[in-house]
Image: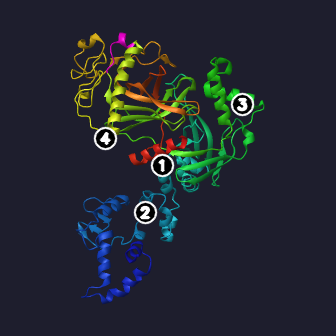
Amino acid sequence: MAVCARLCGVGHSRRCRRRKRPNQQGQASDSDMEEEEEERIVGPRPGDVSGGGAGLESDVATAGPSDAGEYGTVRGSSGAFLNGIITGPPHAQTLVELPPELLVEIFSLLPGTVLPNVALVCKKFRHLLNTETIWRRRCIDEFGMKEDLRKMEVGQVSSRDLYVKLLHPYRHILGLWQPDIGPYGGLLNVVVDGLFIIGWMYLPPHDPRVEDPMRRRPLFRVHLWDNQKATVECMYGHKGPHKGDIQTVKKDEFSTKCNQTDHHRMPGGRQEEFRTWLEEEWGRTLEDIFHEHMQELILMKFIYTSQYDNCLTYRRIYLPPSMPSNLLQPGLFKGTYGSHGLEIVMLSFHGTSARATKLTGDPNVPAGQLTLDVDLRRPIILPDLEQQCRIEKLSRLVIQVHEEVQREAEQQAKGLVVTSSGGEDGCCSDASRGEGMKADGACSDNCQPGPSSSSSSSSSSVPPESQPFVLPVGVMARNEVYPRTCRKCFYGTGLIAGHGFTSPERTPGLFVLFDQDRFGFIWLELKSFSLYSRLTDYLPHAHAPNMERFEAMLHNMQSWTS
């Protein structure tokens, strides 16, 4: 405490040092030890020319008005230099004695959360912390504000008020969140936008245009006007902003409440509300949807989601960490899910598997569930285009691997170890999988050949960089426009279930990697194809601190809807 007080030039220790100085000659004292301690923190004394004060000397010298040249006088931290000779005024011994512009620069580098403690040191520090430069720097560095903050300051809203009254109190709600809307879920992105903090609900493009950009709709905003207290407004409905509220119940969770739900109603009643919602959600009218089952699903979603009136609870979600060994960059993707339309999934990598978790869901498989699980140890080499058109051929390839996986799982359950180098029924064991599968679906030479006689025409099992791809006849696809070449294919399983998430089971399928931004999955049992396209929107404050936090988030997400 004594050293800290002397650093700032305030407190009892400074007077104590002056009283003890006459009695310090020829003896070591506590004050001598404090002097040495201070030298280790703030540098050598003025007379120590060889000390570590050269950096501060250059800073102050360049900041001063004079630059006297070779024979001039330059003042620095070690005194004045006249023709190379030290003449003597001492440099600043405490932080308080530093020039104000240097202190402002130091304070602007500190996190905003510690600045209130700095203001408690002395009046000078408290006065300097009113400098807009400090708070402008904090707004930019901590919240990524790209607006011209000087224009806001001219508009009677200071950077200090912006930070203290808006950004800092609501910093915990920035980032990605999943609303608790039963099986449907969702994706909310809370960002700083000028004088506002806005919660944007992200909506997939209209079915089946999976490669179109995402749509977004504001659900709430927090704003600051005329240096007053931050105000929360609900943005739901078509009557403009109205009173709302935000409550932070616990860490990584918050709730919104609308205080004027009458703003959500429309003059035409529920029928007009439904037609408006249908046009926004699906981009069409009910008369355009001829499939009766699809009409039922759409009506069910409207009834379920509209009852919340924007009074929702949100739980934080993270973007998956990226590793150099990943097959492709993990992240968020839009995918086609038959009559349920487009849904948002999160692709992440876990050792030798790739997993896609639903952020938006449906009554069959709700949000939060693991929709795809891909085994990256089990590549599948596609046959030629003529063979790809036959669903039986593709099914045989995948089912062979699926049966092998089941046998291995049964053996592990019994505590057995697979030691054989070859498999059965045309499948390869782990030891021979390095050789891969032949182009016709048969295994390497260590395994029994498959039923096709064309296996001898393929001499290499290494996947080419790019290979032709076509969907088998009879496989349904929401989007007829899909890539006609792919890079790699792997065995995987997809989650299917009955209405209400009844009788869930994992069914085998084929994961197809087209490029870094697109992949697909063929659901063999459903004879259906899902195409996924990367979500390219900028999402700040969303990356997981580490893999452990991300894994815990995934576990919690699945428990919310299980």
Identify the residue at image location x=26%, y=67%.
82
Report the colour scheme: rainbow
Q: Position of residue 204 (x, y in %)?
A: 55, 30
Quadrant placement of the N terminus? bottom left
Q: Is residue 524 above or below residue 203?
A: above
- Which of the marked residues, 1 or 4, is nearer the chain's N terminus? 1
How far apart marks 2 and 1 lie (CA) works out to 19 Å
Q: Which residue does the numbered mark 1 point to in the structure image? A: 140
**What residue do we see at 77% from left, 29% from top?**
268
Q: Are marks 4 and 2 in contact (CB under 8 Å)?
A: no
The disc, 4 or 3, on the residue closer to the chain's N-terminal end is: 3
Q: Position of residue 238 (x, y in %)?
A: 70, 35
| Of residues 346 and 231, the one drawn nearer to the viewer in this rendering | 346
Q: Amino acid at mark 1?
A: Ile
The image shows residue 481 at horizontal and vertical percentages of: 47, 17
Between disc 1 and disc 3, the foreground one is 3
Q: Nearer the viewer, mark 2 or mark 1?
A: 1
| Residue denoted by label 2 | 103
Q: Which residues are drawn in magenta?
A: 381-388
Residue 273's tag is 3
Q: Secondary structure at mark 4?
A: loop
Mark 3: amino acid:
Glu
- Image label count: 4
Q: Which residue is mark 4?
A: 415
**In magenta stretch: residue 387:** yes
Of tags 4 and 3, which is closer to the observer?
A: 4
Left/right placement of residue 286 relative to residue 18 reads right
